């Protein structure tokens, strides 16, 4: 969204959509963790979730440096397809993820 039309309206709509989806993802994530994860490990899992969000924010610095030399219209699709490829590789190499079930508390 951000790399295609560079108008204020497109940026506003993209930011709004991203914020709304991020908020709903965070709420769903917290609800699932509270419902499905045993009390003994819930704190550890929530700390890992927070750590992963912080790490993702730290990774924006190298991406911003790369974006100084490569246009965003090229960089964003490359990052998106790389992320998709990594997710597919993880899904294919760890078949247990497809059948994993958690214990209800």
Image (cartoon, grey):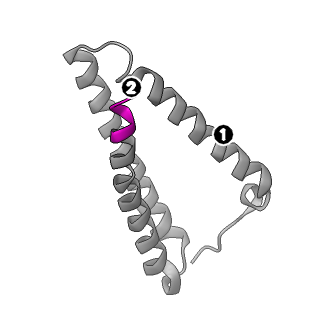
Identify the secondary structure beneath mark 2: helix
Q: Quadrant of residue 34?
A: bottom left
Residue 19, horizontal then vertical, whole percent: 30, 39
Is residue 7 within the magenta segment? no
Instruction: Name the image quarter holding the C terminus.
Output: bottom right
Query: If you read the primary sequence from the N terminus, does the residue marked by circle 2 or circle 1 appear first?
Result: 2
Q: Is 15 or 69 nearer to us in this picture? A: 69
Residue designated by label 2: 72
Between 43 and 76, the residue placed more toward the observer is: 76
Q: Residue furthest left?
A: 8
**Res. 85 mark:** 1
Residue at horizontal 43 percent and vertical 80 percent from the top: 43
SS under mark 1: helix
Tell which of 52 and 100 is nearer to you.
Answer: 52
Q: Residue 37 — which label?
A: none
Q: Residue 14 appears at what percent x and percent y?
A: 32, 26
Residues shaded magenta: 65-70
Decide: is 84 above or below 94: above
């Amino acid at each position: 969204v951000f790399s295609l039309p560079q108008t204020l309206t497109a940026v506003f709509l993209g930011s709004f959509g991203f914020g709304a989806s991020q908020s709903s993802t965070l709420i769903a994530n917290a609800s699932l963790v509270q419902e499905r994860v045993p009390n003994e490990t819930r704190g550890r899992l929530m700390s890992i979730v927070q750590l992963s969000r912080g790490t993702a924010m730290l990774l924006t610095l190298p991406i911003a440096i790369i974006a100084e030399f490569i246009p965003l219209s090229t960089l964003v699709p490359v990052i998106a397809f790389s992320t998709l490829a990594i997710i597919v590789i993880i899904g294919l190499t760890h078949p247990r993820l497809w059948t994993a079930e958690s214990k209800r508390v």
